[in-house]
Image: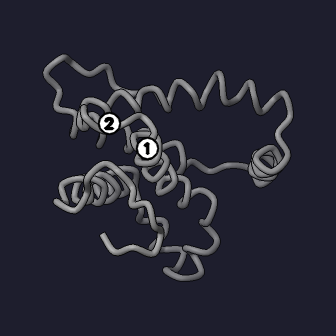
Amino acid sequence: MPFPAWSADTPAEQKLRDFIRVVAERMLQPLRVSAIKVVMREMVDPTIAFTEVVREYIAPMAAVLRGILSEMLPNVPDERIYLIGNSIVGQCLFYRQNRPVIEQLMGKEAMDRITPDLLANHIAGFTLAALANPKFSGEPKANVGEQP
């Protein structure tokens, strides 16, 4: 599932929504339990194969997201762009990694109704609302317990 070929006049917000939809499509695809176990083992104890996966698959996807976020937030430092991107991808991954929990909480039928479009609209809307919040300065607070 490749990312769309966006025209030069495609708004960054649309690119973000499209990006999330593609990632959500990938995350909602059925995956063998054995494949998930391999991925989780590699996350805990990376091997050379993990390095290849990051270089060949994850890094190009991260570059696309970084480009979109940098377009939306031109004055935000790269480190903050990574944090925002990680938050977006983390929301998508939640539905892959925690499907059994979601099914227990919401019910299998409700989980089955979560489509890539629904997830993309939710995550993009949530992210865009956070980025539009006047309290979002692009810089994290120095003290974790400090109120924004």
Most distant residue in the left direction: 9
Disc 1 residue type (three-letter): Gly
Image color mode: one colour
Asked if the residues shown at circle 2 and circle 1 are in contact, with their CB atoms under 8 angstroms apart, the answer is: yes
Q: How many residues crowd around disc 2 within 10 Å: few (fewer than 14), some, or many (20 or more)?
A: many
Left or right of 41: which side holds 31?
left
The alpha-carbon separation of the residues under discs 2 and 1 comes to 8 Å
The image quadrant of residue 143 is: bottom left
**At which x and y percent is residue 54?**
66, 30
Left or right of 2: which side holds 96?
right
**At which x and y percent is residue 68?**
32, 32
Q: How many residues crowd around disc 1 within 10 Å: few (fewer than 14), some, or many (20 or more)?
A: some
- Quarter holding the C terminus is bottom left
**At which x and y percent is residue 64?**
41, 27
- Residue, x 32% and y 36% (percent of image)? 69
**At which x and y percent is residue 52?**
74, 24
Most distant residue in the front direction: 142
- Residue, x 39% and y 56% (percent of image)? 140
- SS class, disc 1: helix
- Residue, x 81% and y 52% (percent of image)? 37
Disc 2 residue type (three-letter): Leu
- Residue 75, label in figure: none
Which residue matches tag 1? 85
| First in sequence: mark 2 vs mark 1 | 2
Which residue matches tag 2? 69
Camera-nearest residue between 139 and 100:
139
Q: How many marks?
A: 2
- SS class, disc 2: helix
